[in-house]
Structures are given as structure tokens and as C-alpha cells.
Amino acid sequence: MNCRDFEEKLHLFVGDSAPAVLRAAAKAHLAECGRCRRLFESLSGAGAALDAVADEGLTTSILRRTSGGPVCAKIEDRLCGWVDGTLTGLDADLIAEHIEHCAGCREIAVTLRALSADLPAMAEVEPDVRFVLDVLDRTSRRRVERPTPLEAVAQWWGRLVRRPRFAQELAYCAAMVLLLIGGGRSGFVGEAPLRDSGVPVWAAGGFAHATELLAGLVHRVGDDLGAAPSRPAVPKEAKSISIGVKRTSARVVTTLDVTGACARRVGGALMRWDTIEIWGAIRDLRDGIGNCWQDSSTTEPSSGGARIPEHERQQVGPFATRGS
Amino acid sequence: MDLTALIERCREGDDLAWEALVRRFQGRVYGLALFYLGNAEEARDLAQEVFIRIYRRLDACTNDETFVPWMIQIARNAAIDRLRRIKARPSAVSVPVEEMYDLPSSEPDPAENLHRKRRRALIHRALEKLSRINREIVILKDIEGMSLERIASTLNLPLGTIKSRSHRARIELAREVIELSSEEGPSSGNGVEVGVSR
């Protein structure tokens, strides 16, 4: 048997289906011919190790002449997916087979796998211990709160009520309104006769009545607002403000009582249309209200005022700022 | 501690919550600054600047789930601004990469700690060899864990480009790591085991 005969019948020898006579002839030929022996070994299981070495160059040559060369540059996507475990099925098997034979891709796959563990761990690098302190130093200014419109109105009202001169100003304005309505030449009193003291009886009675009405109104508003905290839906801020208003209204009532006399004098001066007396009386009225405020700010409201229980004031703190 | 609650408290002006937020994310921001700037001092300063920006704009982060990507975006923008300034005014002092990671560690084994530092320094140098866009993709995707969609919007590039580039960038990084470790020898810290098992 020569080499050509052996190659023609090789499939029979590998499959072990050749007749005994032919197998004996082939065995004799393999003993003499090294090329045919290597060919036979590579095709049979015994030559697997040889295959791996021999096929490396052969595969590369074949690929260069067919598909254009090794696929290493074309499998980046699938190689990353294989390392990440997102590649499955036949694609995963193909990559596994490729990197088994390709040392370059195998090294890249190993490095990629190591990087998959290394890179996420590099996300955090702890700076030195002073870092937090430095950041806090540079951001220590308290943030400006942005309240809702309702909260903004409530805060504005709260600030207004908390002003020390609020009750004085309110009483002063109320007195002036009363005077303008009831004390002027064109007021509701008309051309009424004047008494020697400068204030007509009905005008004095009108002032007293108007003062009483205003005091009652202020008091009632204060009471209504003061009752608000008992409602569950009222926010804490509104409760604080309502108590402040209630307390302020009590001061207003007291102020109106005390300044009644001054108001009558201003009214008389207005009736006579004596400008010097008017301004003098207004100045006295202002001073009188100021003194009354001084008194009421240092003492609790006496009569007619809504007294705020001590425990309630401590709990809610109507004039206390939030967080202070 | 729930991040949403923490951010809400920060918005209300709770300084204690703000301190906790800084402590939680300082490593992340500092690490990102290190990758972009490659200089420990500059990175430290930048990280502070990032937190100041976050502090001022905390109300702008309407969705707490997106806080981390939002923070990373702020850090990136700040880093790019700083890089422009550094190019105009080069830093006088440059800290070696190894020293950047020469920080107190909780690692009980000194040898393991040293190996980890060398490994990180090696990867850092490999990253510096990548193109700017590939480096950013690796930083944002593989280190910071951002989604491809968000990276695309951050870098203002098409999603397809990011997808294809992300694999290429990783392969490129792996090649650089292999090359650097072969240049530096076995002590370089590229102690990856050869052999792939699935």
C-alpha cells in the first residue's frame, strides 16, 4: 500500500470499518511512512494533543484565505458580553471555543474579568479626615428656606404681629379712623353744637360707643383666632400666630380705653377746626397711646383683654421664632 | 439610612443630614475627581467645590432616585472646567499615581493592601492612555455604574455610539493593562490568574 491508497481508504481506518486484510496492509504502511502515521494519529483520538498545536497555524491560514483572518478584532462585543455573563447559548460556546485556542483573546478575557471586579471598587477613594470638616466649613451658612405661599403669608403676618409697635400702631390708626369718621366737620355728626369743653355730648357718646364697638370687634377677632388652635387641622404656625393676635388684641382694647379721653380732645379740636390745637392734640394722643403701650408691654392686660395662660405661652411660644 | 429621607432633611436645612450626605458620597466624588484630574490636591479641592455646588443646587434635584447620576454629572462638569483651567495654568506639583492611593486603609493584610494599591495605580495609568472619550465611558459606566442612556445624555453622544464604544473602551483598557504589567514585571500588581473558566 502506498500513500495515495492509504489516503483514499483513510476514512475506513479511522472508523475502524476496514476489512482485516486492508487493516494489516495499512498498518505496514504506517510503520514505514511517518507522514501518513501523523495524519492517521491526528484524525484519531490519540492525536488530539498534536491537533491543537498543528491546527493553530492551519486555522489561521485557512481563515486568512477565507473570511479574511482571525476573528479576534471582530468579537469585542461578544467577548465583553461573555465575560459579563450576558452572552448565552451558541454565542457563548463559540467565544469559549475561540478563547480556548487564542492566547491573546484568552489573556484579554482574563484581564477583563479582573477589571470587572477592580473598576467598581475604584469608584470610592476616601480622602483624608479633614475633608468633611473643610466641606462643612465652606457650606456652614444655613440654607434659605423656600416656604409655600400660604406659609409665606403666615410668616409675614407673624412678623407683623410680633413687632413691638404693632398694638400701638393699630390703636393709633383706629383712633384716627374714629376721629375722621365721627369728629370732622363733614363727619356723621354734621353741624352739631359745641360745648365749652369743645366736645359735644353726642360726639363724646359716639366716640365711646364706637370705641366700645371697636374694642368688642378686636376682642372677638382675638377670641376667634385664639380658639383656632383647638382645631386639629390648624398648623402649628397658625396656632402660634393666632395666640399672638389674641394677646395683641387684648392690648389694643386696653389702649383704646385709655386713649378715649385724648380722642375726645382731638375730636373737639377738629370740630373747631383749630389746626394748632389739632396737631397738639394728636401729638398728645400719640404720646398717650405710647405710654399706654409701654404700660401694657410691661404688665399683663388687666380687664377685657385675653389673658394667655403661662403654660400655653411656654408651649406654643407665640413670639418665638421657629427653631429658636 | 434612606437616601430620600436624607436628601429631604438636607433640603430643610438640617446640617447634620448634610454632614451625613457628605460622608456618604465624599469617596465617590473624590475618586471621580482623581480619575479626571490625576492629582490628589486638585482632586481634593475639586471634590469640595462639587459639594458646594450640590449644596447650593440641592433643590434642583427633584427626583431623589437620580441624585447619584446628578451628582456625578456635577462632578464631571466641574472636573472639565478645572481641566481647562489647569491647561491654562499647569499645576506646580504633581502627585504620583501611587501616592494618590497611599491613604489609610481598612485592609488588615499589609501585603494585600499593597497589592491593591499597585493594582489600582496600574489601572489608573492604563486609563490615562485611553482616548478622552473612551476614558470617560469607562469611568462613567464601569466605575461609576451609570446607565448607557444617561452616559449618552451626559456626553451628548448617540446611544449606539456609547454602546459600541463601551466594549471597545474596555478591551482597549485591558490591552493597556496587559502591556503595562508586562513592562513593569510581576510586581506591578497585575496578578490576574491565567485561565478562564465559565
Image (cartoon, coloured by chain):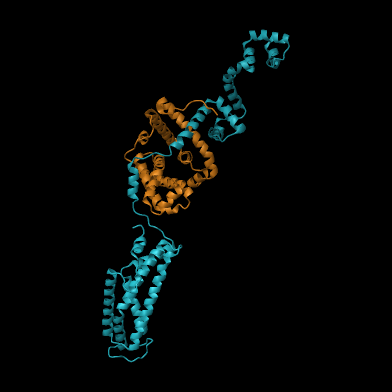
Chain colours: A cyan, B orange
In this rendering, position of residue A162 left or right of residue A113: left
> Where B101 sits versus A236, above or below?
above
Residue A32 appears in the rendering = no
Residue at left offset 30%, top offset 86%: A268
Residue A62, picture quadrant? top right
> Where A63 sits versus A312, above or below?
above
Q: Count the marks: how many?
A: 0
Nearer to us in this view, A313 or A193:
A313
In this rendering, position of residue B145 left or right of residue A183: right
Residue at left offset 49%, top offset 35%: B170
Q: Quadrant of the C terminus of chain A?
A: bottom left
> Where A286 sits versus B48, above or below?
below
> Where B185 sits versus A297, above or below?
above
Image coordinates for residue A253, horizontal then vertical, percent: 34, 75
Image coordinates for residue A198, horizontal then vertical, percent: 29, 88
Image coordinates for residue B63, horizontal then vertical, percent: 48, 51
Nearer to us in this view, B94 or A44:
A44
Residue A235, picture quadrant? bottom left
Q: Quadrant of the N terminus of chain A?
A: top right
Image coordinates for residue A15, horizontal then vertical, percent: 69, 17
Residue B93 appears in the rendering = yes
